[in-house]
Structure formats: C-alpha cells, structure tokens
Amino acid sequence: VASGVGAFIGGGANNTASGQGTVIGGGEGNTVSGTFGSVAGGRLNQVTGSDGFVGGGISNLVNANRGWIPGGWGATTRAHLARGAWAGEGNFSAQGDAQAGEFVLRRLTTDATATRLTADGNAPSLANTVNLPNNATFRLKLLVVAQQAAGAGTVGDCASWEANLLIRRGANAAATVLVGGTAFAGAALAAITPGTAFGAGLRDAGAAGWTLTVAADAAQGGLAVTATGEAGKTIRWVARVQSIETTA
C-alpha cells in the first residue's frame, strides 16, 4: 500500500508507505509513515520520523527526524534527532540492547558563557542530546572541533578535543552517572573530572582559553557536552559522539 501523497513502493510484499513522499524499495513488512522517509529493503523495518532512512536488515526502527540505520538486526535510534544506529546479528532480548551508534552535536558561541552542544543547536531536550534509556550503559568516544568564524583575534583559529567516556543510567534520569573518562592532552592521556572544564588537546595559540566540560545530565538522563568560548569571538563547535550501547 502506497497511500501517502507522492509515495512509492518498488516491490516486495506487505509494505506500507503512508507518509507524504515516502519510498520503499522492496522487501517485506516494511512501514514508512514519517514524511519523506525511506526504506531501501529488508524486513519489518520502520521509519516514523521525517526524512529518516533504513538501508535494510531486519526489525530496525528510525523514530526521530533525520535518523538513519544502514542495516543489521534490531537497532533503534531511540527518538534522538539525526542520530545513527546499527546492530549486528540480533540482540539479547529487546530492540537496541546490543547496538552501536553515532551522534553529531553543534553550537555557536559568542562569549565565555558555558553552552551545551545539541543536535540542532538549540537548548537541550530529550530529543537533541546524547540520552540513555533506563538501565543502560554507553561507552562513548567524543571528538570535538572548534573554529573561530568572526571577532577579535585571528579568524580561523581552531582547537580539538578527544575523550573516552563510560556512562550509565539506572532506573530513571536522576540515576545517570558519568563513571569516568580520559582525554588526550597532546600525546598523553589525562583523567577527566566530570563537571570540570579541560583545555583542548590540540589548538592554535589563540584558542588557549577555550574549554570543554563533560558531565552526567540528571535532568535529561544522558551526557552533557558543554563548550565555553571567549568574549568577542564567534566560535563554531561541532562534536561527533560514537557509542557502543547495551541495556539490562
């Protein structure tokens, strides 16, 4: 059934493209209800968010706008904006309890005020930050780059951070704990203190005052990545967060 305006199904069996401009290439039992979403093939895959994509595989769910799953069996984007997820050959007992993922966060700063990085560059919410489900553990690799776009000093000055983090969440958001982490300071590793700002591992001289802070977000139930720039400088911050995820 291709019931959405401009929807298309190329083949397969028992597929439903109900959102506007949705596409299903083939496969069996796939459903696309989010506008302009698509499933290339596979079985029992769902795209409910706008502009989402599943490449194939089995029983994958993209349930937020612009989320993506390339394939595998049993992954979910957990209602996070524009994140990727993928599983291997199934899971332990529930969708998403053995998967990997990826998030891209960003923010623009124009002063030295500490500012959260989020998927859409807006204030933090459940949908645009790196949040965990209840009773979950994530091992994360964090890469951050910052570049001065305008203002005093030298336009083009830049800095980068690289950190390894372990975070867990218990029965609710308030039970979220950043277990520990390390960050590269040049060629050496240094321990991270949650909630304490640390400088860039690699940087131009003009970026010496820029810092990053990571901490558990007990309100949203995940990881808070916070950037602090410099007065008189417009700085673009972009983070890539790679995850390995399990839930109990």
Image (cartoon, rainbow, N blue to C red):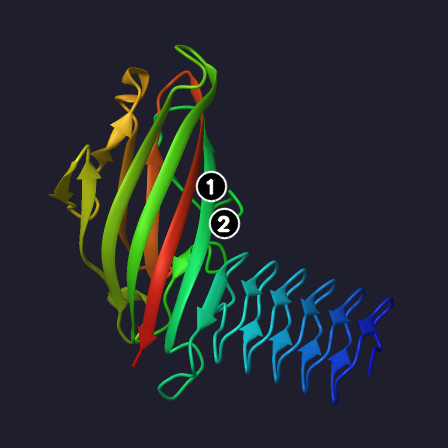
Q: Amino acid at mark 1?
A: Arg
Q: How many marks?
A: 2
Q: Is residue 95 above or below residue 79?
A: below
> Is residue 189 toward the left or the right of residue 232 in the image?
left
Helix, strand or loop at label 2? It is loop
Q: Nearer the viewer, residue 63 or 188?
A: 188
Q: Which residue is label 2 attached to?
A: 119
Q: Nearer the viewer, residue 117 or 82?
A: 82
Q: Which residue is label 1 attached to?
A: 106
Residue located 32% across and 74% down the image: 246
Residue located 39% across and 72% down the image: 99
The extreme top residue here reads 153
| Residue 98 pos. (x, y %) | 36, 76
Of the numbered discs 2 and 1, the one sitting upstream in the chain is 1
In which image quadrant can residue 97 be found? bottom left
Q: Amino acid at mark 2?
A: Ala
Q: Is residue 92 above or below residue 207?
A: below
Q: Nearer the viewer, residue 237 or 187?
A: 187
| Residue 127 pos. (x, y %) | 50, 59
Label 2–label 1 contact, CB within 8 A: yes
- The answer to whether residue 157 is visible is yes
Q: Residues within 10 Å of mark 2 (few under 14, many from 20)?
A: many
Residue located 35% across and 30% down the image: 113
> Is residue 130 toward the left or the right of residue 42 in the image?
left
Residue located 39% across and 19% down the image: 157
Q: Nearer the viewer, residue 47 or 117?
A: 47
Question: What is the quadrant of the N terminus in the image?
Answer: bottom right
| Residue 132 pos. (x, y %) | 36, 66
Helix, strand or loop at label 1? It is strand
> Is residue 7 toward the left or the right of residue 79 in the image?
right
- The answer to whether residue 114 is visible is no
